[in-house]
Image (tube, rainbow, N blue to C red):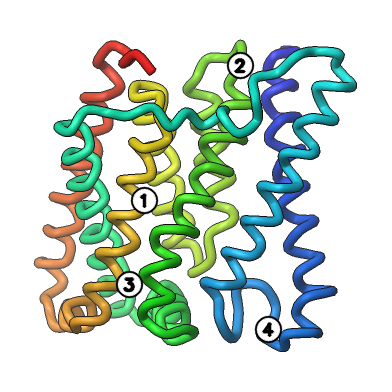
């Protein structure tokens, strides 16, 4: 029981840091810049980038203080995530998984829109319109990288010590989902994405594995929006959208299970 309390305590510690930084943004930065509360209004990608940079910097301080209190010598904070290279074949597979999640995401978005549930679609539109497209692409790389370093490289790595890895993956998936904007649909997809990230990362213990999935997902989604493919999916039949979502979901499930069953790669 003590190990599970420790896992939850580690997660709670870093979630509190995230909440603190978001509150500071809303109270201190928003009145100065006038962009709107965090996740709303103008320059949403830049808001997220700023919050993530400050959160990671503050997490490094919290990390040092925690281990000083525990009188332990920890792994260097900046090497927690592990940036060791992965095989080219794995890299290509990660990219295809990111593209599959894009299609699952897009099909789900348009299917919900057809049922007059526009929250998921509306947030994507607001995010896309909040900054120039070049900022969207930069955000898809830089912000996604920072997000995954924080959630997987730092929070997940700190929490999964001495507990069965499934429970650590479950909790980080729920945390990722809880912090997702765009309504319940995006949160459910966030749970799925959290399970994929955690399961892949424990078998390919390099942050590059999940970075490739996340960056490929975000870039391809907004490129689809830019060239009109995402909007054109609204013209697809309900059956086609369901079929597309199901096929992509199965590809992601089987890919994740394949890594889950294979031996852990050397870092």
Residue identifier under label 2: 161
Q: CA distance from mark 3 to mark 1?
A: 23 Å
Whichever of callouts 1 and 4 sits on the residue coming sooner in the sequence is 4
Residue found farthest to the right: 69
Dividing the picture into quadrants, the one containing residue 260 is top left
Q: Which mark is residue 112?
A: 3
Depth check: 128 or 120 in front? 128
Question: Looking at the image, how many numbered discs can be counted on the residues?
Answer: 4
Q: Closer to us: mark 3 or mark 2?
A: 2
- Please rate how many residues cluster around mark 4, counting C-alpha atoms within 10 Å: few if below 14, some from 14 to 19, many from 20: some
Cβ atoms under marks 4 and 3 closer than 8 Å: no
Image height of 154 relative to 20, above or below: above
Cβ atoms under marks 2 and 1 closer than 8 Å: no
Whichever of callouts 2 and 1 sits on the residue coming sooner in the sequence is 2
Residue 181 in the image: x percent, y percent?
A: 53, 66
Residue 118 appears in the picture as rendered: no
- Please rate how many residues cluster around mark 2, counting C-alpha atoms within 10 Å: few if below 14, some from 14 to 19, many from 20: some
Find numbered disc 1 in the image and state the secondary structure of the residue it sits on.
helix
Residue identifier under label 4: 36
Residue at image point 80% right, 37% down: 62
In the picture provided, is 111 more to the left or to the right than 27?
Answer: left
Q: CA distance from mark 1 to mark 4?
A: 26 Å
- Please rate how many residues cluster around mark 1, counting C-alpha atoms within 10 Å: few if below 14, some from 14 to 19, many from 20: many
Q: CA distance from mark 4 to mark 2?
A: 39 Å
Residue at image point 76% right, 69% down: 25
Residue at image point 26% right, 71% down: 111
Quadrant containing the C terminus in the rendered view:
top left
């Amino acid at each position: 029981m003590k190990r599970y309390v420790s896992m939850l305590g580690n997660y709670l510690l870093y979630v509190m840091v995230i909440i603190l930084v978001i509150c500071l943004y809303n109270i201190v930065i928003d009145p100065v810049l006038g962009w709107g509360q965090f996740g709303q209004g103008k320059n949403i990608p830049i808001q997220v980038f700023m919050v993530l940079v400050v959160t990671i910097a503050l997490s490094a301080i919290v990390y040092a203080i925690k281990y000083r209190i525990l009188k332990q010598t920890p792994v260097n904070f900046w090497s927690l995530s592990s940036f060791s290279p992965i095989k080219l074949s794995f890299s290509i597979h990660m990219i295809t998984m990111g593209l599959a999640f894009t299609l699952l995401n897009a099909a789900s978005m348009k299917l919900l829109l057809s049922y007059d549930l526009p929250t998921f679609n509306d947030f994507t539109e607001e995010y896309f319109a909040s900054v120039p497209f070049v900022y969207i692409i930069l955000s898809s790389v830089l912000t996604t990288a920072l997000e995954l370093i924080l959630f997987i490289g730092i929070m997940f790595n700190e929490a999964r010590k001495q507990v069965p890895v499934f429970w650590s993956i479950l909790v980080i998936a729920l945390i990722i989902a809880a912090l997702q904007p765009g309504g319940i649909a995006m949160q459910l997809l966030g749970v799925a994405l959290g399970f994929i990230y955690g399961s892949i990362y424990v078998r390919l213990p390099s942050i590059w594995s999940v970075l490739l999935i996340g960056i490929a997902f975000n870039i391809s989604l907004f490129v689809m929006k830019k060239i009109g493919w995402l909007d054109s999916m609204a013209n697809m039949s309900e059956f086609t959208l369901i079929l597309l979502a199901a096929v992509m979901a199965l590809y992601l499930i089987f890919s994740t299970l394949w890594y889950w069953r294979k031996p852990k790669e050397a870092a």
